[in-house]
Image (tube, rainbow, N blue to C red):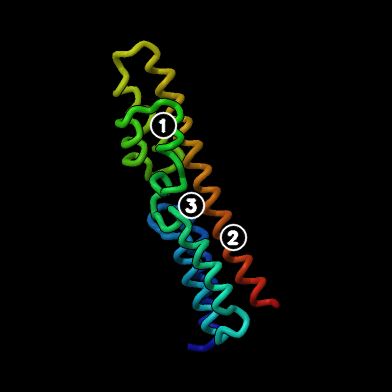
Amino acid sequence: MTTTLLWLLVVLLIGAGLAGTVLPMLPGTALVLLGIVLGAWIDDFSHVGAGTLAVVAVLACWPGCWSTSPACSAHSAPAPAGWRCGARRWARSSACSWGWSACSHALAGAAAGEYLARRADAGAHGQALKVGVATWLGIMAGLLAKVVIAFMMIGIFVAALLI
């Protein structure tokens, strides 16, 4: 392979990694890390050395960053967000099992699970909505964190290449 094709592969891996930070089924930061390591190797580690790769690897291994499910990643915080709102166990598990489409299904899953767990209680509708919204906000915060971490990794890589 020529150097140009290898650099194109670096760009494709990093691009797929960025997409994977918000799309389920793609390990976002893992692909970004793979692209960065390949780029460092292509450059014979002359600009991107061990220190830079260590920093990028620590960012890539941040809790939950390798999760392929945005709704269930460790730092996405859907369960802790639901716990803070008083979600019952069924609602928290429903958020993860229904949460593969982070934008709508996690909210619906958590709300439905909470409603089913509390259906006999007065005010179950309001509590279910509160838990669903809290879970959705936790997932959105987690997705934002994954995107920020991926861009930090890319920024460190590009800065090391240019220096």
15, 41: nearer the viewer: 41
Q: Secondary structure at mark 1?
A: helix
Mark 1, residue position: 83
Residue drawn at 45 percent across, 64 percent down: 30
Mark 3 or 2: the one toward you:
2
How busy is the neighbourhood of tag 2: few (under 14 within 10 Å), some, or many (20 plus)? some
Residue 9 location (% of width, % of height): 50, 76
Q: Residues within 10 Å of mark 3 (few under 14, many from 20)?
A: many
Decide which of 45, 10 is in the foreground and name it.
45
Q: If the image is split into quadrants, where does the C terminus sit?
A: bottom right
- Secondary element at tag 2: helix
- Number of callouts: 3
- Residue type beneath disc 2: Phe
Q: Are marks 2 and 1 in contact (CB under 8 Å)?
A: no
**Relative depth, front residue between 12 and 119:** 119
What residue is shown at x 51% (from left), y 42% (from top)?
Answer: 140
Query: Residue at the spot x=52%, y=61% of the render?
Result: 59
Instruction: From this view, report whether residue 128 is shown above or below residue 30.
Output: above
Q: Quadrant of residue 153?
A: bottom right
Q: From the viewer's perspective, is residue 84 above or below residue 158? A: above
Query: Mark 1 vs mark 3: which is more N-terminal?
Result: 3
State the image coordinates of residue 60 (x, y, percent, origin top left).
49, 62
Q: Quadrant of residue 148?
A: bottom right
Which numbered disc, 2 or 1, marks the residue that appears first in the sequence? 1
